[in-house]
Amino acid sequence: MTVSIRPWTETDLPLLVRANAGAMTAHLGGPESDEKVRERHEKYLRFVHDEQAGILPSSSMGCRSAA
């Protein structure tokens, strides 16, 4: 099996729709409305477009390494 990380794209909406099933969201308050899923998808697309998505360096998250 190969696993890769790539930017979120318009074609990823079906993934959010499938993950919105009752069994997948039972401990998160249940499924979201179709409108909420679409809004979240649009938010993910904005993160990628605005280059806000990514792994932050530990210093930007208030973490310090011990010397």
Image (spheres, grey):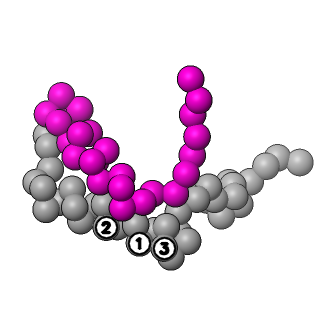
* Residue sitting at x 45%, y 57%: 8
Query: Which amino acid is tagged 2?
Result: Glu
Mark 2–mark 3 Cα distance, whole angstroms, equals 10 Å
Residue 51 placed where, x, y %? 55, 71
Residue that badge 3 annotates: 49
**Does 48 sit above or below residue 25?**
below
Q: How many marks?
A: 3
Left or right: 12, with 67 as reference point: left
Which sits earlier in the primary sequence, circle 2 or circle 3?
Answer: 2
Query: Can you see residue 27?
Result: no
Mark 2 burial class by Cα count in 10 Å: few <14, some 14-19, many 20+? some
Mark 2 and 1 residues: CB-CB less than 8 Å, in contact?
yes
Mark 1–mark 3 Cα distance, whole angstroms, equals 5 Å
Left or right: 64, with 14 as reference point: right
**Residue found at the far left of this picture:** 33
Examine the structure image and report whether residue 17 is included in the region drawn in magenta: yes
Residue that badge 2 annotates: 42
Mark 1 and 3 residues: CB-CB less than 8 Å, in contact?
yes
**Residue found at the far front of this picture:** 11
Query: Which amino acid is tagged 3?
Result: His
